[in-house]
Amino acid sequence: MQLPQFRAHAAFEEVHWWFCGRREIVRTLLHRLLPPRRDSRIVDVGCGTGGNTVAFAREYTCMGIDPDPNAIAFARERFPQCRFVGGSVPRDCADALRVVDAVLLLDVLEHVRDDAQFVRELVAAMKPGAYLFIMVPADPLLWSPHDEGFGHFRRYTLESLRLLWRGQPVRELLLSLCNVRLYWPVRFLRLFTRMRGKPLGQGDSDLALPPFFLNAFLRRVFAGEAGRLVGLLTSQKAPWKRHGVSAIAVVQRIS
């Protein structure tokens, strides 16, 4: 991402329905697998401007890392109470990855040219028993100027996402589409912006803050999917496979 996108993230990530709903979903899954304790350690890979890192730091010991100096500068200025590291993964946080209990990789892989190699190196650096939480944009049909503005290389299907850890020493705990309830409104919006030739929001993206009540409603709709996703961790329920704006996965290093 470039400076305009980081500015958009910094402006919206604590209040916009999508950021808030995503955090609520990830927090619910984290609580199920890793109950909150100050001695439980998390690394937020690709932390951007720091909103997720600081949110989870209220319950866990967290560190954020990002290769972009603009992102780290934003994060350190906004959240001086948290630890942020500028650098590449896993090279510049190898010591941390050997001891952390969970790694967050939230809307990062779509920015990585060789995503399979990145996941292999990350899994190899993690300790046995640690969890890897992944969220990525889904459905190539949703490709739009928003993806281009954010420097995405791809949008995923469940099958293409699963290929990233095939043959790796991990156990798949969850793989599902998410943000399924808002899929059709988002698809209409992305079709409109493709026809228009440019995004609708700030920083070459579709990010714009809706009116308060609509923002609260959208957050509730998105975050409300957490219950079903938690159910997929503990039962044989079929995951959502047909339509979703995002895909989510949780895998555990086993050896």
Image (tube, grey):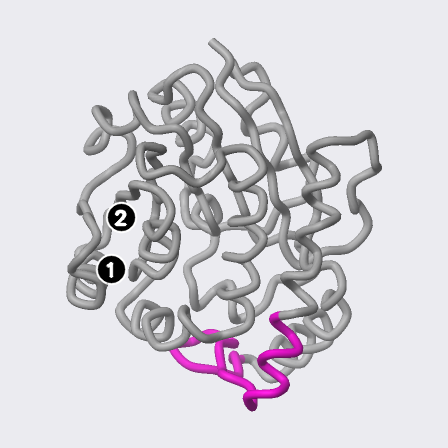
Q: Secondary structure at mark 1?
A: helix
In the image as oriented, which residue stretches furthest toward the front?
37
Residue 125: horizontal and vertical position, in percent? 33, 21
The relative height of residue 110 versus residue 100 in the rendered view (above or below) is below
The kind of residue on which mark 2 rests is Asp
Labels 1 and 2 touching (C-beta < 8 A)? yes
Residue at 38% over, 50% down: 56
Residue 23: horizontal and vertical position, in percent? 50, 57
Mark 1 nearby-residue class (10 Å; few <14, some 14–19, many ≥20)? many
In the picture of the structure, the residue carrying the numbered disc 1 is 71
The relative height of residue 101 versus residue 54 in the rendered view (above or below) is above
Cα–Cα gap, marks 1 and 2: 7 Å
Residue 145: horizontal and vertical position, in percent? 53, 71
Mark 2 nearby-residue class (10 Å; few <14, some 14–19, many ≥20)? many
Residue 43: horizontal and vertical position, in percent? 33, 39
In the image as oriented, which residue stretches furthest toward the bottom?
211
| Residue 140 - label | none
